Image: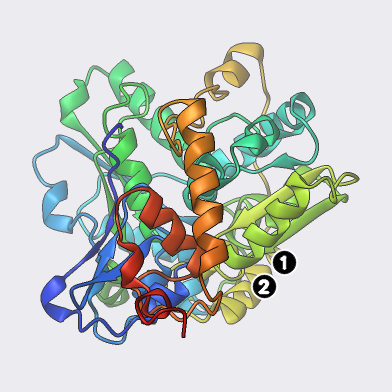
Amino acid sequence: MKEIFHSVSLIKERCIGCTKCLMNCPVEAIRIKNGKAIIYDEKCIDCGECIRVCPYGAHVSKGNSLNETEGYKIKVLIPSVTLYPQFGQEINPEEINKALLSLGFDEVFDITFACDVKAEILKKEITKVEKPAISTLCPSIIRLIEKDFPSLNDHIVKMLTPIEISAALIREKYCKMGYKENEIGIFFLTPCPSWITKIKELKYNEKIGFDGAIAISDIYPKLLKFLNKTSNKTYRKISKTGLLWSFSGGQSQAIGIDNFLAVDGIKNVIKLFNDVENGKIKDVDYIEAYACTRGCLGGLFLIENPFNAERIAKKIIANGEFSYNVELHDEFQSKFAREDILKVNLKFADDFESAVKMIKNMNRIINMLPGTDCGLCGSPSCRAFAEDVVKGLANLNDCKFIKNGGE
């Protein structure tokens, strides 16, 4: 199986085996073995829920530091649209971009332009997939589909995200100016761990080629020193429709779709995807799905309460004066469409016959178990424990119920 990179990891020395992460991981990627948590890489989707619930700081996600941006002739930062509502509605987004330049970057790219480009292309691409079409913005959602809902692959709108579009435009621009690939440093200012993982995967894509991802929480204190409050509440240089992409439901507003579902919180997404698989959701054109509460504004690396941040974002949008007038042509559109959204094939077994046999064994074991999902075996549920047993990752006697003779 292909090695999978994860930004979410465990500091074993801090872990006391308290089971909070075990019982709260929405995709059952965590086990407790020998008094310590372990993360099953093939199951993890980097949603960061374990980081949120761990009271001991044992689960972490590490991105790049500002020091790692040194060594490039040109350093470009792509800030997430979620950055702008983190300072209250009195701080002009233009001032935030100026402050980012003060951190040592040569250019701060306006990601709202890429959001408007994406919106225009999305209007056409959404008609090319099975309904309901599913957004590709959240990397954790794509990994979830890849791992647990492969039947929904044909519903995914196969095109680049605004983050990837931004990087592609930047690299193309500076290469045309005569800079070599290794002289251009492109960094994303991320609200969440899943984009650290995604940026790592994109590092070796010659057309997109990110060089790193920096957590917003890591630069926030430094950024405050360079910020000046302004009484000017008219925002001329960032797109108000681009800012819609910061919160749940905003994508659909940006592309003018009324018949959509916006679902946030990974457990809610799983429930909805089960309904889509079972044919219960048929009359919807588009699904925006986010791992975090209220969409990207609920990212783990953000400061402001996501509900208040959404209020601030909407205030900024209401005071905005313009959106980019994006004119699309065939070359522009094809450049940002992509067919390889899902790359990793995570299978239950290497062949169909073995998979059927393992599923039968798993169901047999499930029928032997109490169904209490107590977690004493080190697995989050009886079903997960049964799967671990058939995969050779656990022993049947690890279940206290079985070990005590079914009592």
Q: Is residue 8 above or below residue 23?
A: above
Find the residue positioned furthest to the front: 405
Image x and y of residue 98, in percent: 36, 59
Find the residue positioned furthest to the right: 283
> Disc number at residue 315?
2
> Camera-side residue: 349 or 22?
349
Image x and y of residue 389, in percent: 37, 56
SS for callout 1: helix
Look at the image and tell me whether residue 227 can be seen: no
Look at the image and tell me whether residue 172 can be seen: yes
SS for callout 2: helix
Task: Assess disc 1: are there few (<14), some (14-19) or many (≥20) residues with their C-alpha within 10 Å of its C-alpha.
Answer: few
Q: Give the quadrant of the N terminus.
A: top left
Residue that carries the numbered disc 1 in the rendered image: 318
Q: Residue 354: which quarter of the image?
A: top left
Q: Residue 329: which quarter of the image?
A: top right
Q: Residue at x 85, y 51 (%)?
A: 280
Task: Assess disc 2: are there few (<14), some (14-19) or many (≥20) residues with their C-alpha within 10 Å of its C-alpha.
Answer: some
In the picture provided, is 298 more to the left or to the right than 344?
A: right
Disc 1 residue type (three-letter): Ala
In the picture provided, is 84 more to the left or to the right than 126?
A: left
Q: Are marks 2 and 1 in contact (CB under 8 Å)?
A: yes
